Amino acid sequence: MSESNVFLVMLESSKQEQLPVHIYFSCHTVRGIVAQISASVVELRTDDGHRTIILLDKIDAVSAA
């Protein structure tokens, strides 16, 4: 299974179960619950209620919070 497929499985799980995930980039981390997933982006609802759109190809790692 490729990295992007593993990421998509974890992100979809966050969306379905409404559980937060940590998304890691080279210099930053974002925590929140997945609101939407498309072919190239994921929309995250952060802990403070903001929505963040992240390009899937920019994600270095994903972990369950």
Image (spheres, helix red, strand yellow):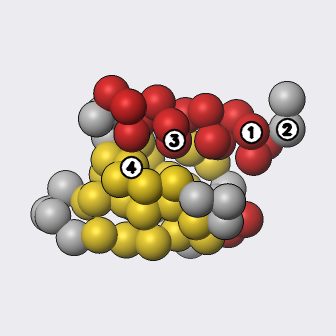
Three-letter amino acid code at disc 1? Asn
Whether residues under marks 1 and 3 lie with C-beta atoms below 8 angstroms apart, the answer is: no
Three-letter amino acid code at disc 3? Leu
Spatial CA distance of label 3 from label 4 is 6 Å
Residue at 28 percent of width and 35 percent of height: 18
As drawn, 2 above or below 33? above
List the residue tagged with mark 2: 2
| Secondary structure type for disc 1 | helix
Query: Who comes first in sequence, dot 4 or dot 2?
Result: 2
Three-letter amino acid code at disc 2? Ser
Disc 3 residue crowd, few under 14, some 14–19, many 20+, Cα 10 Å: many
List the residue tagged with mark 3: 11
Q: Nearer the viewer, residue 10 or 16?
A: 16
Whether residues under marks 3 and 4 lie with C-beta atoms below 8 angstroms apart, the answer is: yes
Query: Who comes first in sequence, dot 3 or dot 2?
Result: 2
Whether residues under marks 1 and 4 lie with C-beta atoms below 8 angstroms apart, the answer is: no
